[in-house]
């Protein structure tokens, strides 16, 4: 009991004061409804890619001269052409068109000889040629035309059958699909885009 009366008033005050950390003092000074930033919470904000530049794209230096600029344009065109040969364009999209291409590419078509035969017919049917040559040229032209028509009918029938079986709910017009396949059938195989992915004789 005597020791209680001997304690100083300052000692009693120190016992009632709670230690305040710097973070708590900062929180007390903030207004009500304050939202801490990501930096204060220890979170890093990811850097955004520069506008107009693809993410991960390598920045290239500007061309040093006109010759280098021409070489870059030539390389860009070659790359775009190679990509078109591999992937094709917007008109080549869709599983139905992929199927139509496979049907055409899996067979030999008379249409691949159409333009070459047309050139021979054009030369052979000129007035400077003998009548026998002109006659043969006209017969060849008629045979090519009939062959392309028959080939186109067979290709269209097979496409219709396969598309009906595999894509019964397709919304693609069959007429446009037939025309797409026929135009591919009269194009030389090495010039077709996208590049054929099946060999001649493969089962589709």
Image (cartoon, helix red, strand yellow):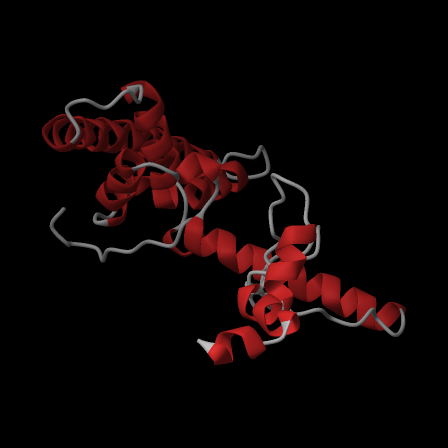
Q: Residue at x 56, y 56 (%)?
A: 81
Would residue 154 appear left or right of 197 to someone viewing this image? left
Would residue 70 appear left or right of 186 to someone viewing this image? right
Quarter in which the N terminus is drawn: bottom left
**Can you see residue 136?**
no
Q: Nearer the viewer, residue 12 or 5?
A: 5
**Can you see residue 58?**
yes
Q: Residue furthest front?
A: 2
Q: Position of residue 165 (x, y in %)?
A: 10, 29
Q: Tell me if residue 28 comes above or below residue 63 in the rendering.
A: above
Would residue 170 appear left or right of 59 to someone viewing this image? left
Quadrant of the image occupied by residue 54: bottom right
Q: Residue at x 60, y 39 (%)?
A: 33
Q: Position of residue 90 (x, y in %)?
A: 47, 37
Q: Nearer the viewer, residue 62 or 20?
A: 20
Q: Residue at x 48, y 42 (%)?
A: 89
Q: Nearer the viewer, residue 1 or 87?
A: 1
Q: Nearer the viewer, residue 108 or 124?
A: 108
Would residue 167 appear left or right of 180 to someone viewing this image? left
Numbered label tally? 0
Q: Position of residue 35 (x, y in %)?
A: 60, 46
Q: Position of residue 39 (x, y in %)?
A: 62, 61
Q: Tell me if residue 134 comes above or below residue 5 in the rendering.
A: above
Quadrant of the image occupied by residue 140: top left
């Amino acid at each position: 009991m005597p020791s209680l009366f001997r304690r100083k008033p300052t000692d009693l005050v120190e016992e009632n004061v709670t230690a305040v950390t710097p973070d708590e003092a900062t929180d007390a000074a903030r207004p009500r409804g304050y939202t801490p930033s990501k930096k204060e919470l220890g979170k890093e904000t990811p850097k955004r890619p520069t506008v107009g530049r693809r993410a991960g794209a390598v920045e290239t230096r500007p061309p040093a001269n006109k010759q280098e600029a021409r070489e870059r344009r030539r390389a860009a065109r070659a790359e775009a052409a190679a990509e078109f040969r591999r992937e094709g364009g917007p008109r080549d999209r869709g599983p139905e068109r992929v199927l139509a291409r496979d049907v055409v590419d899996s067979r030999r078509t008379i249409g691949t000889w159409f333009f070459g035969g047309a050139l021979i017919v054009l030369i052979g049917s000129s007035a400077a040629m003998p009548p026998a040559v002109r006659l043969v040229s006209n017969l060849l032209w008629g045979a090519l035309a009939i062959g392309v028509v028959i080939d186109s009918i067979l290709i269209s029938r097979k496409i219709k059958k396969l598309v009906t079986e595999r894509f019964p709910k397709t919304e693609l017009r069959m007429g446009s699909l037939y025309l797409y396949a026929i135009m591919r059938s009269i194009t030389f195989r090495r010039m077709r885009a996208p590049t054929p992915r099946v060999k001649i004789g493969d089962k589709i």
